[in-house]
Image (spheres, rainbow, N blue to C red):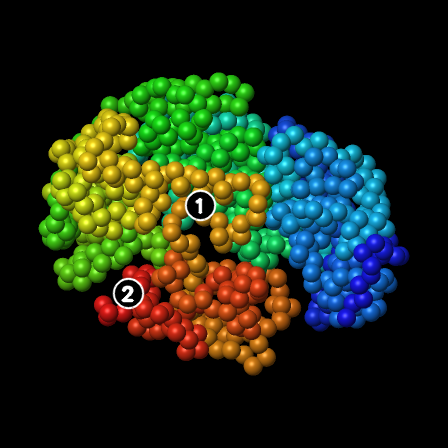
Amino acid sequence: MLRRKAASKQVSKPVPFDQCPAKTWQTDQGEVCLGRPVLEHCVIVGTVAQKLIKLYPPALGRTLFPDGVPLIAAAHDLGKVSPSFFAKLYKACGKPLGDIPFELTVPPEIEKDWGGHAGVSQVAAKALGLPAFIPEILGQHHGFTPPVSGLRAEDEKFGGSAWQQERSNLANELCNRFEMSWPTVESDAQARLIAGLTSVADWIGSGAWFENPTLPWKPNIHKALSDAGWQTPLYQSDLSFFDLFGFSPRPAQEQLIESVRGPGVYTLEAPMGLGKTEAALYVAYKELEAGRASGIYFALPTQLTSNKIYDRFNQFLQGILKENTPNHSRLLHSGAWLVETSMGEEGRPGYSWFSPAKRGLLAPFAVGTLDQALMAAMNVKHGFVRAFGLAGKVVILDEVHTYDAYTSTLLDALIALLRQLQCTVIILSATLNQNRRCQLLKEKLHSKAYPLITALPNNGSVEEIPVVTEANDVVVTIRLLPETDTAMEETLRRAEQGQQVLWIENTVAEAQQIYLSLAARAQEINIDCGLLHSRFTPQDRNRRETRWVRLFGKDGWTERGQQGRILIGTQVLEQSLDIDADFLVSRFAPTDMLLQRLGRLWRHLEAPRHPCAVRESWLLSPELDQAISSPYTAFGGSASVYAPYVLCRSLEVWKRLTEVSLPEDIRSHIDATYNEREESGSMNRWRDELEHGTTRRKGRQSLSQLARIGLASGGKTLPESKAQTRYSETDSVEVLLIRHIKPLTEGGCQLTLLDGTRHTIPKANHSLSKRDWRELSANLMRQTVSISPHNAPMPTPIVTLNKLGFHHCFYLGNAEDGEALIRVALVTEEGTLEGLFGAAIHDCKTLEYREDLGYRSLNKERM
């Protein structure tokens, strides 16, 4: 037992700050020893921060970071000069606590009560009188705000005034080493940026290049930055639009390019197929070439669409980057980025930032989902790291029309933050309504023109610019019908002719059911039938995407006439994919979604088509009266995805249509669906439900309030696993799917994956090289699928997965929680899921995974 002193007595004889260790390190033989001293580690981290800032274009770097910021990063570990932290490291090295050179008053285990050494850094900095925001930045460097309210740096648990004096001595020594004074942090946004810089510099400064305290560290600074992927890209000069894309810009593209004048927010509303992506990328190139931007983040609604646009993005990068750009090959290969770069401590396998989705935000160029960007504005663990990753970049937000009130509130906050972080934000949409555009730019806007550019540079006023239109309106024949069977017969008939047919459902379960109904019959008459949705493993999904997007895209034109094809999918098919169908069947959806889906129909006029093909879409829809009186029955599962009021308003518009002219009708149909109006009867009820919610779903007001809570800077920081960017009644969990598992007697396990490959997860971390661990972890991540908890396998205890070695590859969460964040299931040859070692898989459902269907859950009574 530790002897506690009287509360009034101070701890005597503190360890001098230059003799306090910063961390432990593990030798090649697995022995844990004391590592570098705190002073040396702090200087390393401050130096890394200094170098990171210098990688920005000079003018941009000066705008983002005030003089003296590296000193803040260096001071992040002031709190490691404390008795409890010193004792924790001694204990980790297997040394008895009785050997420490001072009298310990509190056990090191209770450090968590104040957020560990980061909490001590915060209270120490506050006691030193450091400028506003700096104490909080130091306290947050492990990703969250520590619980230090009411605590003082001189408290006995922190070593009293004697230890605080040593922390003060360390701060003074850092000022001398860096020859800097404490900077003035101007705003919350700048504090968020600096907190992110501090965390990333700490990760790199804690990485493999600096672990061995017997080796000099200065020669490794450049190597560590390069290993983490941080180098200044070199750009080709004076490239034309034609040089990059092989065709001359259209008027709308030219107008967007001319309207962008540095950091700010710019929207381009234009029809599907107009080339919005190429226009945004060329704007990004001009900003990079001029030194007004530090990189590009291309954000899309779903992982599937971001995967496919990566190919186009990669080709663009090949055009703008010089061959002698550092890390050139890594920048051009997403898989190589994850495996071949090392982000330091928090980016190691088994830690939360060993994830391509997160790491992409820190890469100079990345395509990813909007979800990851949204967390830059949320009070979520390491949210400020995301803010740092986006700072100064061209951020392209595609398909900004699909989000509910919850996500829209987060998106508005993100755009406001990005403006303060000197980003050039380009918003692309074919179907943005007027009210939403005003909210995004926080301006009163008036133009009803379409297509339309709205420009709001940081150094200027808002401007609405009607776009020169091209005489290329196309007419799509529309038919509404309630019978799915009739649509299936027509689908098979047209596909048998040789047509390429697209069928879009609103839920994964309905898409799977339609596939099962069509696939067997299609095979009998030599029709190729496929399925795309979000519940495939990344490995299977990528293989399916590659094949089907090619067959329905330009690259498949030579094969288009060989046979008819049917591609069935969910909303992922309506967004950002360059696919072209001869005939479209769609489950009824809100107007903006239907217009997006029509954009996949006859997308390229020059594409080869069967002579019998006509530009036509069938919409599976209930009767309007039935929908208004009982939308949950009439619309089925779609009413759980989209608000019944919006579905009914949309159906009012579409029930009278026999054709749609694109893009001419886009603005009028959007306005007719979303313009505010008085309601009565059942429609008033559904509008009230949309605003205020019901027991089964939350209304817009509640969703916006929930989102604002997620944005609040005060209160407890959310763990990333609980941070929702799109509201649903349940979170989602990652499920690892494997074929076989064999525990090893010494710990760890052998795995057989679904494709038959075998891998060993050893018990000891030093059994594999760091690169081998990254490669193994990346392989396993390609075998996961994201599922709602009520459809997922039962949770697996963290202790079980630790024994099997999974903590080396996946971030499992806090041991105190008991249950691991990731769940593991075995897939039988028949496709049924089973629990590990005979454990139950689910209380009331049968779970399956099939290569052709993906993941699904079935009520047991249906089996």
Is residue 678 depicted above or below 504 in this figure?
above
The picture quadrant where one finds residue 68 is top right
| Residue 254 visible in image | no
| Residue drawn 25% across the image and 32% down it | 673
In the image, taking residue 465 as reference, residue 236 lies left or right, namely right
* 677 versus 365 height, above or below: above
Name the quadrant of the N terminus: bottom right
Question: Residue placed farthest to the right in the image?
Answer: 13
Q: What amino acid type should be assigned to the residue bearing mark 1?
A: Thr
Quadrant for the C terminus, please: bottom left
Q: Quadrant of residue 815?
A: bottom right
Q: Nearer the viewer, residue 302 or 778?
A: 302
Instruction: Please count the marks in the image.
Output: 2
Q: Position of residue 87 (x, y in %)?
A: 77, 62
Residue that mark 2 sits on: 858
Give amino acid for label 2. Answer: Leu
**Residue 80 horizontal/vertical position (percent):** 75, 53
How far across and down, in percent of the image, does residue 301 sit? 39, 43
Q: Residue at x 53, y 30 (%)?
A: 419
Identify the disc placed on residue 725. 1
In the rendered view, tell whether residue 549 sits above or below residue 859. above
